[in-house]
Image (cartoon, rainbow, N blue to C red):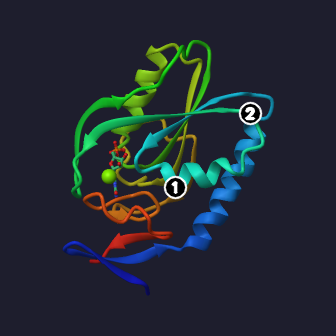
Amino acid sequence: MKEITILDKTFVESISETNLQARIADLGRELNRDYAGKDPLVVSVLNGAVLFTADLLRHFEFPHELQFIRLSSYHGGLESTGQITPLLDLRGDLGGRDLLILEDIVDTGNTLAWLRQHLLSRGAASVKMATLLFKHEVFKLDQAPEYFCFRIPNEFVVGYGLDYAERGRQLRSIYKLKA
Ligand code: XMP
Ligand code: MG
């Protein structure tokens, strides 16, 4: 079992690079079917979704625009704070556009709910979300993300874009906090 230490915590590998890339390719095929003939605005949520975005986009066969959004809600530790404000917002008119949000992880669903509301209030015709990881046990909304690669238990994870105190984003696998 691969182990790594980041600052004061030890993590063990939970999803390998091979498994990540295989599921991302599956998701790419699913999106190619669902978005055939469309031209969505892909909204990647900084910073965590950067690696997922780069790898997933390379499977896309439909035209799309890419923009980034950055939210403040999370302050580097192991717990979310709940308060969300945009630090970097989308440019231009969203009126009538189909939006596909790319996220690293959906936990309680607070961020997803806030994003849906924010983007619909700016006139988007539809807002869907594809997330790499889905902590389904803690999710508390009715409407789940439309697409996800992996459902995971309620454990803190790092790697492949996800950080612990802004460290560990470069890791090619997902690691979970060692019990
Ligand atoms: P929710 O769905 O609760 O998720 O709004 C809020 C944000 O929390 C972050 N998050 C994590 N980040 N490891 C991380 O590195 C985790 O296990 C984890 N769980 C939640 C993530 O930024 C998400 O957007
Ligand atoms: Mg984070």
| Number of residue marks | 2
Q: Quadrant of the N terminus?
A: bottom left
Name which quarter of the figure residue 32 lies in.
top right
Q: Residue furthest bottom?
A: 1
Q: Residues within 10 Å of mark 2 (few under 14, many from 20)?
A: few
Query: In this image, 29 relative to 85: left or right?
Result: right
Q: Which residue is mark 2?
A: 63
Between 60 and 142, which is closer to the camera in this rendering? 60
What mark, if any, has residue 90 been given in the picture? none
- Which residue is drawn at the image coordinates 61% and 73% (left, top)? 18
Residue 145 placement (x, y as % from top left) = 51, 41
Q: Amino acid at mark 2?
A: Pro
Residue 6 placement (x, y as % from top left) = 27, 72
Q: Amino acid at mark 1?
A: Leu
- Which residue is drawn at the image coordinates 79% and 35% (left, top)? 36
Name which quarter of the figure residue 155 lies in.
bottom left
Classify mark 1: helix, strand or loop.
helix
Residue 124 sits above or below residue 72 on the image:
above
What mark, if any, has residue 51 been given in the picture? 1
Classify mark 2: helix, strand or loop.
loop
Distance between mark 2 and mark 1 Cα atoms: 20 Å
Residue 143 sits above or below residue 149 on the image:
above
Residue 42 sits above or below residue 10 on the image:
above
Residue 157 placement (x, y as % from top left) = 36, 64
- Which residue is drawn at the image coordinates 27% and 40% (left, top)? 73
